[in-house]
């Protein structure tokens, strides 16, 4: 096997109450990447398409840094070239950097014969993610690699738990095409929080995990409440309250910020409700001057997938 083309999906991190630990995988939006073996040693990025000004230097590109971490551990006697077809806008809040970081290690691992498990691949990909967010965290990378919902129980040592996905669960992603850098969105968060807020947040996260295990859609909705991060980051997102209210009025289970924003996600029971939410948010955003995209996506329980080989 000398070459593989993959779909590396977008992801939603935090999922309201699960800051830095919870995420889920999307199916409607993702990057494509081609990874191929070369006789010359090392890792090289040979093509980046999509209209974004991303570095070709492997030490500055998230896909390159992740790939180098795996490559230096595996020590093969050949090298790899990486082509990136970027469909997820950087700074969109739907895991653009994670798609690149996870995709490069997935593809190289595949061409090596899959010597590494997903948990090890997540560790390598976190090195690249840190280039974008200034910290190593796995709440976007893990769902991209594992699929479905994932909970990062621990970063050191890394421990990722897979959480069941209710079959009728859909996500609506409203992406206003402005950029919010993860590092900047983290900088506005408080260093300390009230104990009362922490208790509410723990309760919501615990009940959300229980709801996903038991297919309790109503409880999913009651649990998607973030009293720690959303009050601060929502100030960076235009039309946030209106988007949230329009989704809830259209029968979404719950709505919150996707990653660090500006994208806003809503979870819905059934595709018909998801389409209602999309239409309501589309009408709202058409009245603004901000370009936007709205995606309706089934929860992707597979994660990265092979397109051709």
Image (spheres, rainbow, N blue to C red):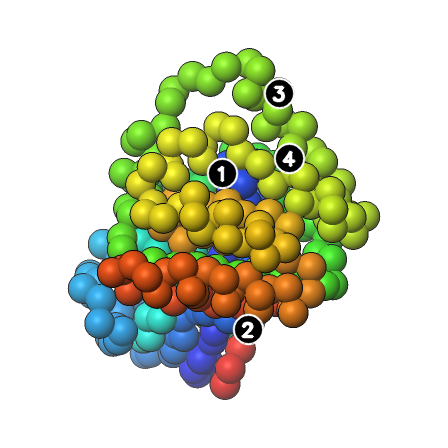
In percent of width and height, residue 52 lies at: 22, 66
Closer to the N terminus: mark 3 or mark 1? Answer: 1
Q: Give yes or no for contact between labels 1 and 2 (Cβ–Cβ under 8 Å).
A: no
Identity of the residue drawn at 43% across and 17% down: 192
Say which of 267 and 91 sits in front: 267
Return the residue at label 2. 305
Above or below 156: residue 282: below
Identity of the residue drawn at 47% across and 73% down: 7
In the rendered image, which quarter is residue 45 located in? bottom left
Return the residue at label 3. 199
Above or below 153: residue 286: below
Q: Give yes or no for contact between labels 3 and 1 (Cβ–Cβ under 8 Å).
A: no
In percent of width and height, residue 17 lies at: 56, 36
Return the residue at label 4. 205
Closer to the N terminus: mark 4 or mark 1? Answer: 1
**Inter-mark Cα distance, 2 to 4:** 29 Å
Q: Relative to 295, is 49 on the left or the right?
A: left
Identity of the residue drawn at 37% across and 60% down: 285
SS at badge 4: helix
**Inter-mark Cα distance, 3 to 1:** 17 Å
Closer to the N terminus: mark 2 or mark 3? Answer: 3
In the rendered image, which quarter is residue 100 located in? bottom left
Identity of the residue drawn at 51% across and 47% down: 245
**Inter-mark Cα distance, 4 to 1:** 12 Å
In percent of width and height, residue 163 lies at: 69, 49
Q: Nearer the viewer, mark 1 or mark 2?
A: 1
Closer to the N terminus: mark 2 or mark 4? Answer: 4
Residue 20: image tag: 1
SS at badge 1: loop
Q: Give yes or no for contact between labels 4 and 1 (Cβ–Cβ under 8 Å).
A: no
Q: Give yes or no for contact between labels 2 and 4 (Cβ–Cβ under 8 Å).
A: no
Q: Relative to 257, is 42 on the left or the right?
A: left
């Amino acid at each position: 096997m000398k070459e593989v083309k993959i779909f590396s999906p977008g992801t939603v991190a935090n999922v309201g109450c699960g800051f830095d630990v919870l995420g889920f995988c999307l199916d409607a939006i993702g990057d494509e990447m081609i990874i191929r073996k070369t006789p010359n040693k090392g890792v090289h990025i040979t093509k980046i398409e999509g209209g974004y000004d991303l570095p070709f230097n492997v030490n500055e590109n998230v896909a390159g840094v992740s790939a180098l971490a795996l490559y230096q551990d595996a020590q093969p006697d050949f090298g790899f070239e990486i082509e990136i077809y970027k469909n997820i806008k950087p700074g969109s809040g739907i895991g653009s950097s994670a798609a690149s970081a996870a995709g490069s290690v997935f593809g190289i691992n595949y061409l090596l014969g899959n010597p590494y498990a997903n948990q090890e691949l997540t560790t390598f990909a976190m090195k690249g993610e840190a280039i974008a967010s200034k910290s190593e965290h796995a709440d976007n990378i893990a769902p991209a690699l594992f699929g479905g919902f994932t909970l990062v129980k621990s970063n050191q040592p890394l421990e990722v738990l897979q959480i069941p996905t209710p079959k009728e669960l859909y996500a609506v992603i409203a992406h206003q095409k402005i950029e919010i850098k993860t590092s900047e969105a983290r900088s506005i968060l408080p260093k300390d929080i009230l104990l009362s807020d922490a208790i509410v947040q723990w309760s919501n996260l615990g009940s959300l995990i229980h709801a996903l295990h038991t297919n309790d859609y109503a409880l999913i909705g009651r649990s998607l409440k973030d009293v720690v991060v959303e009050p601060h980051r929502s100030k960076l997102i235009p039309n946030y309250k209106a988007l949230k209210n329009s989704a809830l009025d259209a029968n979404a289970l719950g709505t919150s910020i996707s990653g660090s924003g500006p994208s806003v996600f809503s979870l819905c029971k059934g595709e018909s409700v998801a389409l209602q939410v999309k239409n309501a948010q589309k009408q709202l955003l058409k009245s603004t001057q901000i370009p936007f995209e709205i995606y309706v996506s089934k929860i992707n329980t597979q994660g990265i997938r092979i397109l051709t080989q």
